[in-house]
Amino acid sequence: SYAYHLPLDSGKNHLSFGLSLGMMSQRVEQNDINGNPNDISVGEYNGQRTYLDGDFGAAFVSGGLTIQAAIPNLKSFFKKDVVKLADVVTFFSAVSYNFALKNGIEIEPKVAYRGVRGFDNMVDFGTQVSLSEKRFLLMGVYHSNQSATFGLGLDIKKRYLVSGMYTTQTSELSGYTNGSFELNLRVNLAK
């Protein structure tokens, strides 16, 4: 991932642009199938090749206000017939405001609106709480598909950010899976 920040004045207003590239490889584990493992659709899904994909986003920041927009999964955005995956996000937009309180505590509520191919667009309501001058992060998000995400993070010397997030499943899928967990590492190369 790479981000570029363009100052708009000598104050706190700037535009940020980001580009992320990655490899996508998805498979269904045969042992986890509750049904016919010889189903043709499983074979077709597992026969997909690993491919390069990317995301593009932009953000406007003015003081505590942040307005964001992104196009994830650029390959499927430009070539709609190439990638046949479920639950592909088609766009992302969000507005948040950061309230700086005393003793290095910040609270940032956020509202996001995003599209998912083949489903109703989703609205997310959440808040991130930063403690000790953004060294410790706590977050929670409610999604309009009746799931929720909870996370925490640790910023080490303003260079490394380690975070983990757990997302509950929607009510329709709760009998099949308990949710998903992500572990992330961000390294600030500019420091």
Image (cartoon, rainbow, N blue to C red):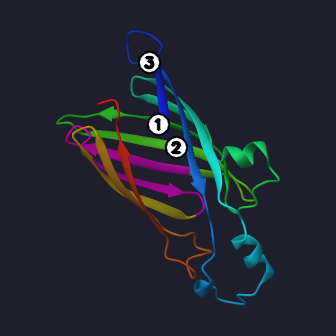
x, y (%) of residue 161? 32, 46
Q: Earlier in the sequence, mark 2 or mark 1?
A: 1
Q: Which residue is mark 1?
A: 96
Q: Amino acid at mark 2?
A: Val
- Which range is magenta? 124-145
Q: Earlier in the sequence, mark 3 or mark 2?
A: 3
Q: Is residue 31 left or right of residue 99?
A: right
Disc 2 + disc 1, Cβ < 8 Å: yes
Q: Residues within 10 Å of mark 3 (few under 14, many from 20)?
A: some
| Magenta span dominant secondary structure | strand
Q: Which residue is mark 3?
A: 13
Q: Is residue 156 left or right of residue 182?
A: left
As drawn, the label of residue 111 is: 2
Q: Amino acid at mark 1?
A: Ser
- Viewer-nearest of discs 3 and 2: 3
Q: Residue at x 46, y 36 (%)?
A: 96
Q: Is residue 25 magenta?
A: no
> Which image quadrant is residue 34 in?
bottom right
